[in-house]
Image (cartoon, grey):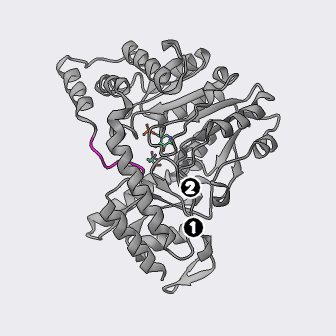
Amino acid sequence: MEHFLSERINKLSTSQTLAMAALARELKAQGKDIISLSLGEPDFNTPDFVKEAAKKAIDDNYSTYTPVDGYADLKEAICRKFKRDNNLDYKPANIVVSTGAKQSLYNIAQVMLNDGDEVILPAPYWVSYYEIIKMAGGIPVEVPTSVETDFKITPEQLEKAITPKTKMIWYSSPCNPSGSVYNREEMTALAQVLEKHPSIFVVADEIYEHINFSGTFCSIASIPGMFERTITVNGVAKAFAMTGWRIGYIGAPEFIAKACTKMQGQVTSGANSIAQRATIAAVDADPKVLQHMVEAFHRRRDLVVGLVKQIPGFKLNVPEGAFYVFPDISYYFGKTLRGKLINNADDFSMYLLSEANVATVTGDAFGNANCIRFSYATSEDLLTEAMKRIKESVS
Ligand code: PMP
Ligand code: GLU
């Protein structure tokens, strides 16, 4: 019956992060003892002060449609956050609040891209960038990196990838899936390349900004000359353990913010009222309130990196942020494990699911076919057990 569906949907790939999470859930429901390291989602509860703000919003009857671009006082709070954390001088007219950073990204692609426009994606990139760009008629242009270079692109690589058709570059730092963080020096070197190409716009996805152990963070919009052509994407899902609340936002040049507002005005209207009220409390809070979660992620990072290094054939960078490790497992390609031939990262990820009962995501989904991704946003006990099972399954 698929032929009744549009070509657009038939050409779209399923989100592999969500698909793997669903498969892990299904196997668990069948009674299998699966450890799911597939979905990138904090295992903490949303902080109490955020929950209180949401409860108050219900009691205060925040129950009607919201302004399409977000409540005015939330947009003001987001401007304060951008100033406090990123030294960026956005005004409320630059801000659009959306139903998750995913919708922010979707809006951007829809309002910026024409058919055939090229978008540079340093690979590995977050799984949905590729399809969101494709859906808008854009052409993703992958710039490969590897574990040896900490999965970061160089200015030379960026320069080489630019063509007359290049419209944008999209990246996340800290990066999902590699955990790499571009410091100010590296970011400035990339900005210097872009300086020579003033019509290229940047999507800086900073959703993992606070989950960063490197002691360095750089918003590209804070580099002279970049503010007017950067769209800074952020949200509360990761830092505040609010994945289900579905609030993301952008800081962008006003004409882009207006266009994104027009776009979502026809598709979803303003984001959820209660979640927006709760987000005011979140973005206004001193980031120190997140310290216990960041410290836990840091400990888990050290634990997982230590354990992965003991697994034969796994090559690993030390991720500086987010909550993923992205080992290169290409050592196993062409080898047979327990009678199963491993041809690629998809095979390896499925092997770990069936033989180690550990759910991961293939690196293919993120534009690097030599790697697989583990999310370490789960308890130290489960992480230790998962790494033990993986090690046994390949020994
Ligand atoms: N960007 C990156 C890099 C992500 O990992 C995610 C994960 N969900 C998103 C954007 C989307 O965030 P949200 O849940 O706010 O839609
Ligand atoms: N961003 C998370 C991940 O990469 C959540 C899944 C998703 O939004 O696709 O796993």
Instruction: Report the side of 384 relative to 154 (left or right).
Output: left
Q: Which residue is mark 1?
A: 345
Residue 68 screen position, x and y as percent:
43, 18
Residue 327 screen position, x and y as percent:
55, 63
Residue 114 screen position, x and y as percent:
69, 31
Instruction: Report the side of 69 relative to 6 (left or right).
Output: left
Q: Quadrant of residue 229?
A: top right
Residue 250 screen position, x and y as percent:
51, 26
Q: Which residues are magenta?
A: 40-45
Farthest residue in the front direction?
Answer: 215
Farthest residue in the bottom direction?
Answer: 339
SS of the residue at dot 2? Answer: helix
Q: Which residue is mark 2?
A: 365
Q: Quadrant of residue 140?
A: top right
Viewer-closest of 260 and 317: 317
Identity of the amino acid at label 1?
Ala
Identity of the amino acid at label 2?
Ala
